[in-house]
Image: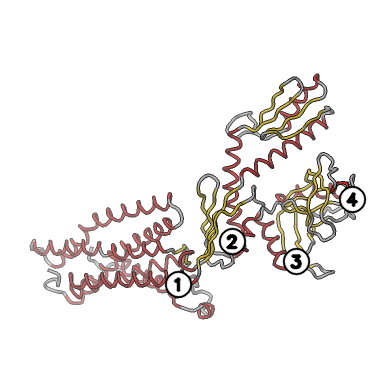
Amino acid sequence: MMTLSRWKIIAVVLSVVFGLLFTLPNLLTPSQRAALPSFMPKNVLNLGLDLQGGSYLLLEVDTGALRAERLTNVLEDVRKTLREEGIDFGDLAQVNGEVLVRVTDPAQVQAATTAIRNAVGAPLAGVPGGRDVTVRSEDGQRVRIAFVPQALAAESAQAVEQSIEIIRRRIDELGTREPTIIRQGSNRIVVQAPGESDPERLKNVIGQTAKLTFQMVDETVSSEEAAAGRIPPGSELLPSQDGYSTGYLIKKRALVSGEMLTDARMQFDQQSGRPVVSFRFNGQGARRFGDATTQNIGKRFAIVLDKQVISAPVIQGAITGGSGQITGNFTEESANDLALLLRAGALPAPLKVEQQSTVGAELGADAVKAGQTSTLVGFMAILVFMLLAYGLLFGGVSVVALLVNGLLIIATLSLTQATLTLPGIAGLILTLAVAVDANVLIYERMRDELRAGRSVIASMDAGFSRAMTTIIDANVTTLLAALIMFQFGSGPVKGFAWTLSIGVVTSVFSAVLITQVLLAWWFRATRPKTLPIS
């Protein structure tokens, strides 16, 4: 164990170089980091919300609105299906979370039930041949359509998971690094955005549903009649933001939806110079948009975002290229935000802000200072203990190994861009405190061997070889506990577990290999007759 192998020396030198290179950017100012050569690492520690300040939001996914939307879609599907089948009906309405319709001719009730069952709803996951709605006839001429309870629960859970992913994409588009986005309970989401100083903008970008649809304007009724309440079935009156009208009567059936968008960017109109949002459809969207514009030349279609009309232009000709522009009263920032939302995708359901708070940069700076102070105090305590217990040489070697261990931890955190939180600093301090345990085990084993009459070289070799089993056992146990915390914990717990996991690996490396190389150099240079710790 005490042989000075070449691979051990190379490993120690490379680890020290790695630690210095990736720790150095944390000691430089932004301008100094920018001036570094291109081959030099420039990543610094990524501080969490509690250390650098930022915004905290507790959001609730409005699953009730999601169910209401699904119910509306089912109602429109029933209307369309019965009309296509030529079946007369009436009293189509939503009642207590279900859709009811009365078939005019009793002889067509069975045909209506079969047609609705084949056309409405979607396959039910996990049930071969099952669908997410039930269709049954009752009272002779009435057909009732209801959602299967399992389908609603599964859809709500999926909406929360989908919302988390979309929120993550939107925050990433804002440039916020390492946000913490976790599920809380059945329908709540916690968002922590370190460094985001404007919680209102964050809330607006996250909370906007951003559901974009292209729908035809219903011109069978004048705007005055629509405002008076004469709205034809299958249409709805929506408010407008285009500056030309307060509202438009829109057909509920969407021609194209925002899910078919592949890209959206803020640009400037070549004629007016005003900000616009250009978009591009995928193949399916391009075909449907081209067909819709070809069949409705001279008519108006509406671009609807979250139940508000952004623009309602007249179709001058077929648009078959699969791309277009959204014009409106945009500022450069609002056009950028809209493009961001469209690229990230639409939320499946609205989000309600349950709690909002901001952590100031001053509070974060105080936390960093407190963490630095506690780390320094812990290091000094370990330094004094090791020097008093094992002398200047062996205690000093342990301290050198501990310093390299700290470099490796900071370098690894900087390289991986893991978020360092206040609990993470606690994990760092715990790692430093436990790191010298391996040295204590090795040194005490050396003492025992010396007392048993073994030679210096044999005692040193036995100290490393016979303590390794205990060292590995203790650290593997700690590592397993850290991995369990990382897997099942959230937020601060994960930060603590990740720092602890890195510390366990670097501690074993530094306390064993670096200590062994340094003591081997000392032994080769001095050839001592006894050890200063005997």
Q: CA distance from mark 4 to mark 1?
A: 60 Å
373 is higher (above) or lower (below) than 92: below
- The x and y percentages for residue 416 are 47, 63
CA gap between label 3 and label 1 equals 39 Å
Does dot 4 land on a helix, a strand or a loop? loop
Q: CA distance from mark 4 to mark 3?
A: 26 Å
Q: Secondary structure at mark 3?
A: strand
Counting every numbered tag in the picture gives 4
Q: Nearer the viewer, residue 255 or 285?
A: 255
Tell me, yes or no, whether the two marked residues, 4 and 1, touch with CB atoms within 8 Å.
no
Q: Amino acid at mark 4?
A: Lys
Q: Which mark is residue 30?
A: none
Query: Splitting the image into 4 quarters, where does residue 396 fall?
Result: bottom left
245 left or right, relative to 201: right
Q: Is residue 294 above or below residue 81?
A: below
Q: Earlier in the sequence, mark 3 or mark 2?
A: 2
Q: Nearer the viewer, mark 4 or mark 3?
A: 4
Secondary structure beneath disc 2?
helix
**Residue 299, labelled with which disc?**
4
* Residue in the picture at 56% in, 66% down: 196
* Residue carrying label 1: 365
Q: Which residue is disc 3 drawn over?
A: 267
Label 1 crowd bin: few (<14), some (14–19), many (20+), radius 10 Å: some
Q: CA distance from mark 3 to mark 2?
A: 21 Å
Q: Which scheme is used to colour this image of the protein?
A: secondary structure
The dot on residue 172 is: 2
Residue 344 visible in the displayed image: yes
Q: Amino acid at mark 3?
A: Gln
Q: Residue at x 76, y 61 (%)?
A: 278
